[in-house]
Image (cartoon, rainbow, N blue to C red):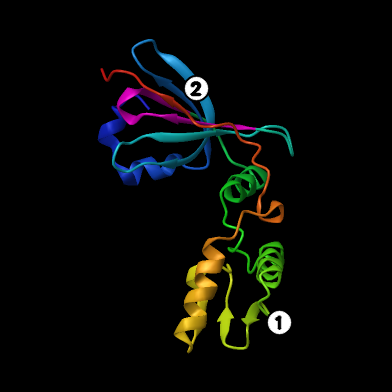
Amino acid sequence: MQRDWLHLGPLQWTTYVNKELQVTAGMEAKEFAGWLLTIDPVSASLVLVSLGEEGGSGSIRVVMGHAVRRVEVLRDADAAAAQRLRELFASPTCGGPDPRRRAAVRRWLERNRIPVEECADRLRVAGALTLAPPYGPDDCSGANPVVLERVRKLLEGQPRQEADQEPVPMELPQIVFGQSL
């Protein structure tokens, strides 16, 4: 791409998503390579992901849109790369309820002496309210406002459980600044 990146616009930018790119940025003409995950439509910034070895760590780099001098497509994503890119930031609730989260919430409520029973993918709490996936304070429903408020406050105070945390193999994003031409 030899034209100015900022002037392409969102419709053209989306054609670069899920492609491996070589991006030249800044006055120093630094080069960055990675899979384009997304583009910020306001700043035209690119989010490049370098996929590490299978199960290994990768990295995320944000290249500011105003610094982009040149974008070159190296290759399109094959099925495996596209799947890895989709899974990187997928919410655990995208594919349905997370059984680890449900178990952690159930343990937390039982430790606080609240009776809980499982009904399919929902939790029935104190026989008065229902807790739906993803099992947060805003996912409670019931007719008794006193019980509802107490359970919500209890869920808000729940410490993060090890079962809830997924190891994050990615490094923190690196932001590249530069001057536009």
Quadrant of res 55:
top right
Q: Position of residue 131 (x, y in %)?
A: 58, 77
Residue 32 — which label?
2
Q: Report the side of 109 relative to 9 (left or right).
A: right
Based on the picture, tell me whether residue 67 belongs to the magenta stretch: yes
Residue picked out by circle 1: 117
Q: Position of residue 73 (x, y in %)?
A: 49, 30
Q: Residue at 55% of width from left, 67% of height from top? A: 154
Predominant SS of the magenta segment: strand
| Secondary structure type for disc 1 | strand
Q: Nearer the viewer, residue 162 or 4?
A: 162
Q: Report the side of 115 relative to 143 (left or right).
A: right
Q: Looking at the picture, which amino acid does disc 1 mark?
A: Glu
Span colored in magenta: 58-72
Q: Position of residue 26 (x, y in %)?
A: 36, 17
Q: Report the side of 33 relative to 5 (left or right).
A: right
